[in-house]
Amino acid sequence: MRGHLLKYPVDVEVDRTGKVKSLHERGSGSLNDSKRHSFLEELKQSSARRIDLSDIAGRVAEFSFDQHGSQFIQQKLENCSIEEKTSVFKEILPHASKLITDVFGNYVIQKFFEHGSHEQRKMLACQLAGQMLPLSLQMYGCRVIPKVYLSSSI
């Protein structure tokens, strides 16, 4: 049913049952995939139930690459507990270099430079060491660089 792709973003397709699936999920069909889909759908709805960071544990990096997931994480990082922030940080740090240059992920990294602990900002800055020039020339990475300098007390 690839003919239906014109109705949806490029990275999704409609399976035989009519369910919209990411091309990255093809063939997996696991409960976690449907759970991810339902959380993202709930985030898109204004009448969504209250979803917490704990609901997306283990999938924070994945959600950071999604428009609505990224917005959700950004909002939560402004007011979440230190423990929640630490949990989120542990999940995004291994993906920081990809998130920095991602259209939605860069905002999550920026939020950590604004609301993260001194140690978290320092660890993120270390990930950027030696990459300042290429990142400053990259469409989304250039948005993160000023946050590094603004938190330059690292």
Image (cartoon, grey):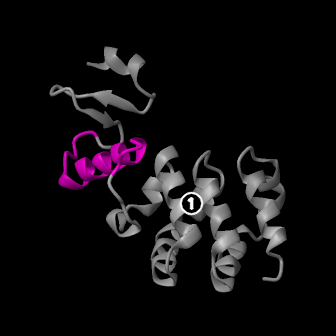
Residue type, mark 1 in image: Gln
* 23 sits left or right of 93 in the view: left
Residue that appears at 51% across and 50% down = 65
- Label 1 crowding class (10 Å Cα cut-off): few <14, some 14-19, many 20+? many
The main secondary structure of the magenta stretch is: helix
* 67 sits left or right of 113 in the view: left
Quadrant of the image containing the N terminus: top left
The answer to which quarter of the image holds residue 74 is: bottom right
Comparing 119 with 23, the one in front is 119
Magenta highlight on residue 99: no
Q: Residue lying at the far front in this picture: please name it.
A: 47
Residue that appears at 70% across and 80% down = 122
| 117 lies above or below 6 | below
Residue position marked by numbered label 1 in the rendering: 74
The answer to which quarter of the image holds residue 21 is: top left
Quadrant of the image containing the C terminus: bottom right
Q: Position of residue 75 (x, y in %)?
A: 55, 60
| 76 lies above or below 106 | below
Q: Position of residue 124 (x, y in %)?
A: 66, 73
The answer to which quarter of the image holds residue 47 is: top left
* 37 sits left or right of 118 in the view: left
Q: How many circles with numbers are drawn on the protein?
A: 1
Residue that appears at 51% across and 65% down = 76
Q: Which residues are magenta?
A: 26-48
Q: Position of residue 126 (x, y in %)?
A: 71, 76
Residue that appears at 32% across and 28% down = 13
Callout 1 secondary element: helix
Comparing 78 with 153, the one in front is 78
